[in-house]
Amino acid sequence: MHLKQRLDRFCESAPKRLVQAVEYSLLSPGKRLRPVLCLMACETAQGDFQQAMGNACALEMIHCYSLIHDDLPAMDDDDLRRGRPTCHRQFDEATAILAGDALQPMAFESILEGALSPSAMVESCKTLAWAAGIQGMVGGQMDDLLEENRAQMHPSGLSGSQVDQESPENRLGSIHRRKTGAMIEASVLLGAIAAGATTECRSALGRYGRGIGIAFQIVDDLLDVESTCEKTGKATGKDAARGKLTFPGVYGIAQSRQMAKHWVAESLAALEPFGKRAEGLGQIAKYILERHS
């Protein structure tokens, strides 16, 4: 409801086809993991979740833009997302690019039209910009693309670069701390900021967010190996075919599963100071470990 209200307000005089593409992607069925984390973190930090609604919507807008662009032929070239044709398949490639472009400034407008104090708005914008930008999600996506078919590119394509000098384990960890982990950690931090949480509280929630961010990516990699298109709503088995660096590819399935359990346990430990207030966040951590899509 809140996403639809913001979309209607932002798009009153925008080109109809562009609005349709944004609406098709933003309002499609999905987990809404990042906004839910934001709202629950706000409540865990003893804030009113309504205060965090602008931040929560912003997170889903940035996440949605990233999915639209990730699915493009120049990136992962996917035909399905959440069980439906991807945006560029439903519309066209240029419209999909513009839909992703439109969602980025819309996200920051959502924060600035929220119920926060001016200082909290500024901090929220800075936190989201860092997590989504060149040091966070976009940088991680760039490294992920460089890893594809790396063996065929070496030495002429990547020789002498940092990505060549580091071990696969370090490269994998670096990619996903940025590509997936940064936005998940930012989700709980944006909730904490909205609640006016203390530094100690933010630190604990940040540890929780980092842990579930890594666990989420490990499980995502395992699903690509072990699950089906019908269960996940997107193509599976593509990571290995594209030469992507994945947790099962580096550590094997059994060790990857143990790593996911370890990081969920670390996340749950970070929530202990909050007691019953963090029950919702704890359930999300457990869900991440057990999810099938």
Image (tube, grey):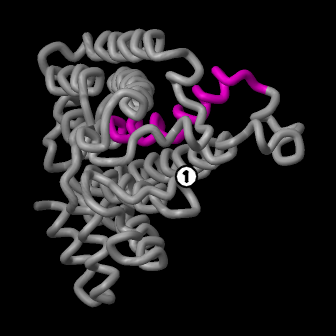
The secondary structure that most of the magenta stretch takes on is helix
Image location (x, y in percent) of residue 107: 36, 62
Badge 1 amino acid: Gly
Could you say which is closer to the camera, residue 211 or residue 83? 83
Please give the residue where the numbered disc 1 appears in the rendered image: 133
Can I make out residue 267 in this image? yes
Image location (x, y in percent) of residue 204: 36, 21
Image location (x, y in percent) of residue 256: 46, 16
Query: On screen, 44 above or below 63?
Result: above
Q: Residue at x 51, y 53 (%)?
A: 76
Query: On screen, 113 above or below 231?
Result: below
Which residues are the magenta region?
A: 166-189
Is disc 1 surrounded by few (<14), some (14 to 19) or many (20+) residues within 10 Å?
some
Can I make out residue 206 in this image? no
Could you say which is closer to the camera, residue 52 or residue 247? 247
Image location (x, y in percent) of residue 25: 29, 64
Residue 168 covered by magenta stretch: yes
